[in-house]
Image (cartoon, rainbow, N blue to C red):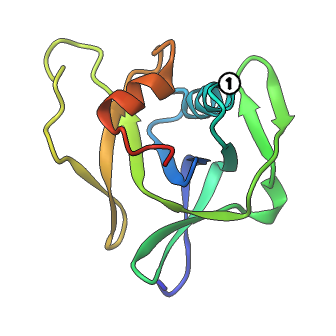
Amino acid sequence: MTAAPSNIHATAIVVGSTGLLFMGPSGWGKSMLAFACIAEAQRMGMSAILVADDQVLVSTQAGAVMATCPASIAGLIELRGTGIVQMPHVASAVMHYAILPGSVSGEKRLPPEGERMTIVDDIDLPVIRLLANTPVPLAALLAKAPDIGR
């Protein structure tokens, strides 16, 4: 395990057994995209749950990237324009992908294959790019990574 978990600005969820870490600038829509993925997965009969919103403690454990929720915000997610709501949650989970904002301009429409992102120090994850206005974000993520949810 790393010396101490690092607190990052992100939203972490689990779909099936796949951890998704939504990262990006403030206002990108991390929370709403994560919430939409949870709702979409549940409609499809898949398990999906919140780990943490806004603050995520990231560390490694036995080579896995772990996301843990600070106790003070456990089970809370901000849905911009709606407010803070309570949801079922887990205290921590293994993360498998970093979900980052896609490019809305035509200049970098196609992200590089095999892209990875360093989350903090020596902790990195494979990246999937996603536009904030994607109407069915889980469907887009599953198209890119069919192993999500398994």
Q: Residue at x 49, y 28 (%)?
A: 138
Looking at the rendered structure, the secondary structure element under dot 1 is: helix
Q: Residue at x 47, y 14 (%)?
A: 133
Residue topped by disc 1: 43
Q: In the displayed image of the protein, which residue is found farthest to the right?
A: 86
Q: Quadrant of residue 140?
A: top left
Task: Please provide percent x and percent y for residue 40.
Answer: 62, 25
Task: Please provide percent x and percent y for residue 63.
Answer: 39, 79
Q: Residue at x 55, y 82 (%)?
A: 4
Q: Is residue 64 above or below residue 48?
A: below
Which of the two residues, 45 or 61, is positioned nearer the viewer here?
45
Q: Quadrant of residue 86?
A: top right
Task: Please provide percent x and percent y for residue 50.
Answer: 69, 46
Task: Please provide percent x and percent y for residue 8.
Answer: 53, 57
Residue 51 vs residue 4: left or right? right
Q: Quadrant of residue 31?
A: top right
Residue 104 vs residue 46: left or right? left
Instruction: Look at label 1 and name its amino acid.
Output: Arg
The mark tally for this picture is: 1
